[in-house]
Image (tube, rainbow, N blue to C red):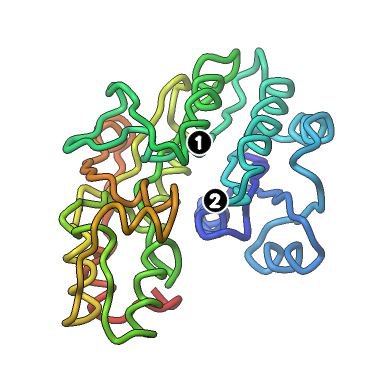
């Protein structure tokens, strides 16, 4: 298939790009600069410089493709507008067709939850509450739309875990996020990329898929994989230090990704986050 991909230079998107090319798909990656275009070209994609906030332009590009995957994120206050524009373009271009559109959601919409499944009532962290409306537009729209909801993504020396690695390296110890007793549900970025391809190729549309490996370490376990000296702090101190991001990181979450396993044959197999932190967290992983 000829696939349009957003976010192809990001942690998730670059892994998805590799997986799509390996699966034999032809990929067009929307990028923001010539250097980014050269980067995706090195991975086997065709780069097109464009503005994802321009929904009519994006819809015109989408019409020339068989499917699309949206992984782009600005990680700032414009993210809701970015997602709205991309979703609007997908609904416009793919409405009434069987062309798959795979949208990226997030695990934090489920709040504190010891056994997350896609049928659970959302209890979103304030930081990501805006995601709910967009995800529902994709699932309810007149398109073959699916949503992938990644857990805490790790691998390639990047993602949220890299924040812990940097802090431990700088200080020789680590101040935990809260008490450290909360669980983070996790997924290796290459296992996640495999799931995106499976959703693209197999999913019927109208469903969300929690992308979680089933390995749910505590934050304390992650810290102790990096250094012998870890220090808890109060939830209030974490929020004062990290704001709404800290509030989300305090969530106690566990998940297995059962729907993706049973319906799509997804079988995450990469080393756990604790293993990677213990062995040395580098971009070679």
Sequence order check: which comes first, mark 2 or mark 1?
2
Query: Real-space Cα distance between discs 2 and 1?
Result: 10 Å
Residue designated by label 2: 20
Crowd tier of the residue under label 1, counting other residues whose Cα lies within 10 Å: few below 14, some 14–19, many 20 or above: many
Which residue position holds label 1?
200
Quarter of the picture holding the N terminus: top right
In the picture shown, does residue 229 fall above or below 43?
Answer: below
Residue 183 percent across, percent down from the top left: 20, 51
Please give the name of the residue rendered at 44% of the width and 52% of the height, measured from the top-left corner. Answer: 243
Disc 2 to disc 1: CB gap under 8 Å:
yes
- The residue lying at 44 percent from left, 47 percent from top is 244
The picture places residue 105, in percent across and down from the top left corner, at 47, 37
Nearer the observer, 104 or 43: 104
Name the image quarter holding the C terminus: bottom left
**Tag 1, which secondary structure?**
helix
Question: Residue 135: x, y in percent?
Answer: 50, 26
């Amino acid at each position: 298939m000829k696939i349009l991909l957003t976010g192809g230079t990001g942690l998730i998107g670059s892994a998805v790009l590799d997986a799509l090319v390996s699966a034999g798909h032809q990929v067009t990656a929307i990028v923001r600069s010539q250097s980014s275009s050269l980067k995706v070209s090195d991975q086997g994609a065709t780069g097109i410089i464009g503005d994802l906030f321009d929904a009519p332009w994006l819809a015109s590009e989408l019409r020339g493709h068989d499917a699309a995957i949206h992984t782009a994120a600005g990680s700032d206050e414009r993210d809701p507008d970015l997602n709205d524009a991309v979703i609007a373009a997908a609904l416009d271009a793919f409405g009434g067709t069987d062309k798959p559109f795979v949208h990226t959601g997030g695990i934090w919409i489920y709040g504190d939850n010891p056994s997350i499944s896609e049928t659970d009532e959302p209890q979103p962290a304030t930081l990501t509450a805006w995601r709910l409306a967009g995800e529902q537009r994709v699932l309810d729209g007149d398109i073959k739309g699916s949503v992938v909801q990644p857990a805490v993504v790790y691998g390639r020396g990047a993602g949220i875990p890299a924040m812990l690695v940097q802090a431990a390296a700088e200080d020789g110890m680590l101040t935990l996020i809260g008490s450290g007793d909360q669980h983070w549900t996790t997924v290796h970025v290459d296992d996640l990329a495999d799931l995106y391809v499976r959703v693209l190729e197999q999913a019927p549309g109208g469903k969300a898929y929690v992308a979680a490996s089933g390995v749910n370490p505590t934050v304390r376990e992650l810290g102790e994989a990096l250094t012998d000296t870890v220090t808890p702090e109060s939830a209030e101190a974490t929020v004062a230090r990290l704001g709404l991001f800290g509030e989300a990181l305090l969530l106690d979450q566990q998940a297995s990704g059962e729907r993706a396993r049973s319906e799509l044959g997804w079988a995450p197999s990469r080393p756990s986050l604790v293993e990677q932190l213990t062995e040395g967290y580098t971009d070679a992983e």
